[in-house]
Image: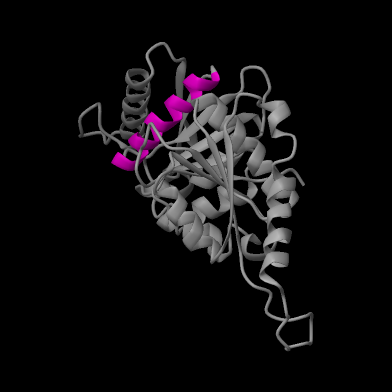
């Protein structure tokens, strides 16, 4: 995560109600981190060679650029009302939405987006913008969806990979900043075969399998007590499909954190079933954390 002095939380807006919800979530994130908030609108119309200035015979306040300026001003006002005293700036960036946001990523603490939108930020969860931003952004990406809760733990999905350890570190920091507990969840399936080319079922003692999966979880959480001595940490290794297990855990959480890529059922997160499931079905905001290459 970028921690350079002055780094801001960035939120993408498009004038939709979902974007304003993302603004409020981003304002809370910026306030608890003592960071400024930067409101960004990707303004695609110049790329399409559409006239964006007021028509000669129209009102002076007309035109697509004036509308974009108005929606950014409204988002800035929403953020200032949500977090009084927060330093908030807004900017219109000519270009496609994902490109505008990815341009912000190298110096951002995180990027926050709504789960639905209009224009360049439309179809956010299932469209190309979310996939591109969360796949390539050099900072965590937070999607405002599900229920907003002031209580409940921060839940993090663990699969034992280096990327899930990055997600654990981010989730622990979030839990500490929010003054809540961290709940680490590792979902596993019974091995199907003894190896490539061998379709014979693997014989596994349940206690042996459970012990191995518990170790995966313990290793992912190693060192948290030293970095966050006051943090309450619970862990859960459970047999089941990760999407179902994480969705169930999200129903009592204020935030669900998943790694940008992983191993096993959490592999290829942004293009695979787990990330899509989390972004579609989680009952709380979802943060996708991509580990450095």
Q: Residue furthest top?
A: 85
The x, y position of residue 195, in whole percent, is 79, 80
Side of 17 where 139 appears, left or right: right
Quadrant that contains the N terminus: top right
Q: Is residue 231 above or below residue 167?
A: above
Question: How many numbered dots are placed on residues in this image?
Answer: 0
| Magenta segment main secondary structure | helix
Residue 59 visible in image: yes
Q: Is residue 31 above or below residue 153?
A: above
Q: Residue drawn at (71%, 72%), measured in percent from left and top?
A: 205
Side of 127 where 164 appears, left or right: right
Give the camera-side residue of 114 and 214.
214
The x, y position of residue 245, in whole percent, is 50, 59
Q: Residue drawn at (57%, 34%), measured in percent from left and top?
A: 110
Is 32 colored magenta in this rendering?
A: yes
Rendered image quadrant of residue 225: top right
Residue 279 visible in image: no
State how the image is colored. one colour
The x, y position of residue 250, in whole percent, is 44, 49
Rendered image quadrant of residue 222: top right
Give the camera-side residue of 255 and 145.
255
Is 206 colored magenta in this rendering?
A: no
Give the camera-side residue of 94 and 5.
5
The x, y position of residue 265, in whole percent, is 62, 65
Q: What's drawn in magenta, residue-wise?
A: 17-33
Side of 88 where 190 appears, left or right: right
Give the camera-side residue of 23 and 227.
227
Q: Residue drawn at (74%, 43%), measured in percent from left and top?
A: 292
Q: Residue drawn at (32%, 19%), measured in percent from left and top?
A: 81
Side of 242 where 207 appears, left or right: right
């Amino acid at each position: 995560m970028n921690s350079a002095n002055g780094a801001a939380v960035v939120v993408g807006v498009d004038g939709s109600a979902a974007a304003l919800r993302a603004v409020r979530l981003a304002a809370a994130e910026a306030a608890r981190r003592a960071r400024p908030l930067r409101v960004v609108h990707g303004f695609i119309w110049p790329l399409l060679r559409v006239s964006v200035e007021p028509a000669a015979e129209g009102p002076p306040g007309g035109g697509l650029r004036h509308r974009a300026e108005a929606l950014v001003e409204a988002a800035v006002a929403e953020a200032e009302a949500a977090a009084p005293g927060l330093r908030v700036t807004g900017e219109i960036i000519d270009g496609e939405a994902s490109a505008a946001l990815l341009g912000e990523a190298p110096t951002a603490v995180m990027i926050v987006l709504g789960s639905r939108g209009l224009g360049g930020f439309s179809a956010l969860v299932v469209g190309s913008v979310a996939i591109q931003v969360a796949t390539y952004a050099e900072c965590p990406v937070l999607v405002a969806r599900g229920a907003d809760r002031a209580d409940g733990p921060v839940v993090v999905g663990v699969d034992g990979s280096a990327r899930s350890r990055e997600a654990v570190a981010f989730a622990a920091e979030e839990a500490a900043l929010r003054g809540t507990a961290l709940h680490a969840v590792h979902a596993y399936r019974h091995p199907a075969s003894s190896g490539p080319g061998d379709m014979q079922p693997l014989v596994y003692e349940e206690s042996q399998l459970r012990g191995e999966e518990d170790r995966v979880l313990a290793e992912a959480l190693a060192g948290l007590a030293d970095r966050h001595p006051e943090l309450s940490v619970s862990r859960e290794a459970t047999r089941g499909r990760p999407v179902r297990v994480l969705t169930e855990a999200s129903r009592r959480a204020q935030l669900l954190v998943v790694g940008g890529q992983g191993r096993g059922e959490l592999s290829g997160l942004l293009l695979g079933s787990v990330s899509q499931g989390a972004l579609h079905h989680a009952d709380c905001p979802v943060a996708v954390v991509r580990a450095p290459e």
